Image (spheres, coloured by chain):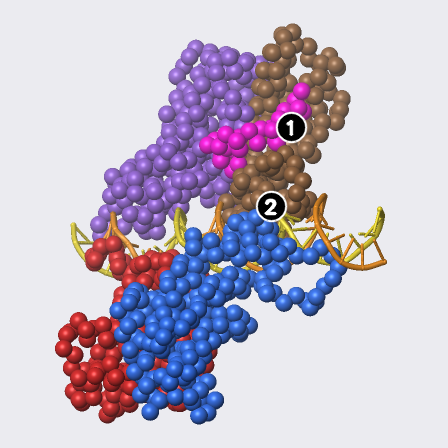
Chain colours: A blue, B red, C purple, D brown, E yellow, F orange
Amino acid sequence: MPMQHSSPSRTTGRPRSAAADEAILEATRAALVDVGWSKLTMGEVATRAGVAKTTLYRRWAGKNELVVDAVAVLFDELELPDRGSLAADIEGVVLQFASLLDRPETKTALMAVVAEATRDEPLRERIRTSIVERQKRLVLVGRARAERRGELPAPADPCVAAAAADLIFDVAAGAVVHRVLVSGEPVDQEWVRRFTALLVGGLAAAAD
Amino acid sequence: MPMQHSSPSRTTGRPRSAAADEAILEATRAALVDVGWSKLTMGEVATRAGVAKTTLYRRWAGKNELVVDAVAVLFDELELPDRGSLAADIEGVVLQFASLLDRPETKTALMAVVAEATRDEPLRERIRTSIVERQKRLVLVGRARAERRGELPAPADPCVAAAAADLIFDVAAGAVVHRVLVSGEPVDQEWVRRFTALLVGGLAAAAD
Amino acid sequence: MPMQHSSPSRTTGRPRSAAADEAILEATRAALVDVGWSKLTMGEVATRAGVAKTTLYRRWAGKNELVVDAVAVLFDELELPDRGSLAADIEGVVLQFASLLDRPETKTALMAVVAEATRDEPLRERIRTSIVERQKRLVLVGRARAERRGELPAPADPCVAAAAADLIFDVAAGAVVHRVLVSGEPVDQEWVRRFTALLVGGLAAAAD
Amino acid sequence: MPMQHSSPSRTTGRPRSAAADEAILEATRAALVDVGWSKLTMGEVATRAGVAKTTLYRRWAGKNELVVDAVAVLFDELELPDRGSLAADIEGVVLQFASLLDRPETKTALMAVVAEATRDEPLRERIRTSIVERQKRLVLVGRARAERRGELPAPADPCVAAAAADLIFDVAAGAVVHRVLVSGEPVDQEWVRRFTALLVGGLAAAAD
DNA sequence: TATTAAGCGAGACGGTACGTCGGGTCTTCGG
DNA sequence: CCGAAGACCCGACGTACCGTCTCGCTTAATA
């Protein structure tokens, strides 16, 4: 997962330590918690992981890529259990997402790598595949479930459906991120309730 | 505006050059366009501004503070002319905001300083007062206008009104930011139309 | 004494404070004792003297010139009372000179300004007139006294006499300076006795 | 020779470049010639040597230590070939020493580091072992040779002998240094002849 | 089993930027 | 015109990380 090797698969020589990989990612997360993104150094990560700097650079191109990989796994925790209604599903996942964003390692890292990505297309792609697309899947699952429940009509055009899913994703994820990181206000029960009402109401209105 | 002086206003000694201030901020914006946030150096800014590094440090504590001030003024361009309806007002301001975020100096800087701010309370406060609060005002203006037009009911409780404004702000700003910087998709006429429909529908539903 | 003014003598305007001059030199000596030559700064001297940096630069061209003037006055303390014999005179003045060199302000400053002077002819001249020539006078006085006593013959040629005085001066001053600053050994009674014996013996032998 | 390593000899890691050492010292001497001591900068030396500043600081604590090492090697050139008599030996070595002191790199550096050493005991020690002691050896060699020739009596007490050697060293080195650097007069054939006469006369007188 | 190609730790390397300090100059005000 | 205060430009400081490079050593798959 870390880096595409020059040779798609070597066979000779000593294989890379699998243990080192996880130690490095773990050390990266720990360092993010302790010192934050901007004071995170490759040397520090290497030391914490009990590994030489060379080993880091053999696997990741730099700090950006390393941190994306270290943080990406955290976003796999997000789940969408069936809570019985569209509103309940939304409230559940929004709370989950907000509490994930509140963790120090994601809080300090996420916006930073996004900022770096504005001038780095490969990084942008990596973020998209490692983090963004995995969350967007939740929107599709939730939508399908709501349709099955009859809460939302099935879209006529699959292309329109995709655009709608993108919109919902940007609105939901964007609102939470903005609330937490920019406004700096808590995503509490009350806010989630109001946000969900707004979103469900908008979806219903748009469906007419 | 740059830095609070130790004494609110000294009288002795040579006064600080007012011209330098603007030259520095302008140089900062130009450098952001050319090299982006992470490769922006204080030395480079000083050179571009025709100023000594010490002059920068005398006025700003570091790169973060400098960039916030340099970028903040751009957000004052946002306006909310009366376009005749709530939907038209929202579409107008969202398009404005999106095109502002698309400028290279804001695109590269905004997320970066927000990321830094997660570990720096004074910086967070500076961002809030210099950038965030100025935008939030637009929400209040738009809401009042919609109420005057009869598109939205006047809220019973001013406290509830404030929370609603905050929510709308986080949703609108967050959605645009996420669309542009995270999803990396354009905020075009079509997307704005769909987003506005969702938001207006949600507001109408919530008002009932 | 400090600096030759651009106009040999002005008449209009506020005259320079005479008190400032002495305060600055005194502050310079004090700072030399505290921090030594290489960490001595003009700003520090100005602060200690309760004077603005501008005032320093109006009177001295730089650190070198200031320190020469500050230290020069100390060399005026050297005296050559008649101790009854050439050897006693030499012993007396050598001890005086050594104890002067042992003072922290001279110890740290003297070699430093001499070093600077190797690439700065005006400074070399200033050192010569302010410090060196004043000591050389002692040699002439001592020689004349020894001749009056009949310990040394009067030189036939005044030109030869001058060269002899220069030689004695370089030998005496050089030996003490080298002993104190380079060898780092004390100039005690015993050493002075041995040195004087060597010098007087040499003079006597050369006189034959 | 440059700096005592923390571990007397490491085994792991990339070894220090031996070539860099000589390049740095050579660059230091060249820079001394061109710009003198007080305008000599570590950055300039690094650039001239084609080396990073960090490499300098990894090996030497600062400018003082670096310059001592750079200049010390020049003093190894001094030799004391047998010229047949004590006076001839002295004249020879004094001329050698004077011409060494006349070289721009020593002239500007020697007094400077001695001045610095007045407030820096480790530096003083470094100067002593790297420069001073090596010259003092010449005195011992010359003395022994003179005794063998019968020009000087063998000293009864070895302790007295050492003190005498120290005295001669301070007188000879001090006189030359003072003549060249303080008085700023040339050490020509004539001066050397007169000085040697004085010294040999003094030694003879003291031996009685 | 021996070879061998790569991985690995350590740490020196050439760089770039940092934030600070001091130098010497200037610009203001008040005396 | 002097003097204080302090901002100004400049250049050097010594440090921190960067990402790369040598070292000597392990380690496992292949021959």
Whether C112 is drawn above or below A205: the answer is: above
* Disc 1 element: helix
Q: Where does the magenta region start and end?
A: D112-140
Residue A141 appears in view = yes
Q: Does residue D138 show up magenta in the picture? A: yes
Q: Does residue D137 show up magenta in the picture? A: yes
Residue D134 numbered mark, or none: 1
Q: Amino acid at mark 1?
A: Arg
Q: Residue at x 41, y 29 (%)?
A: C104
Considering depth in this image, is D16 or B86 the residue closer to the camera? B86
**Displayed quadrant of residue E28:** bottom left
Residue B150 numbered mark, or none: none
- Image coordinates of residue C132 in percent, x first then y, are 46, 32
Would you name the residue on which mark 2 appears? D28
Residue positioned most to the left: B156
**Displayed quadrant of residue B82:** bottom left
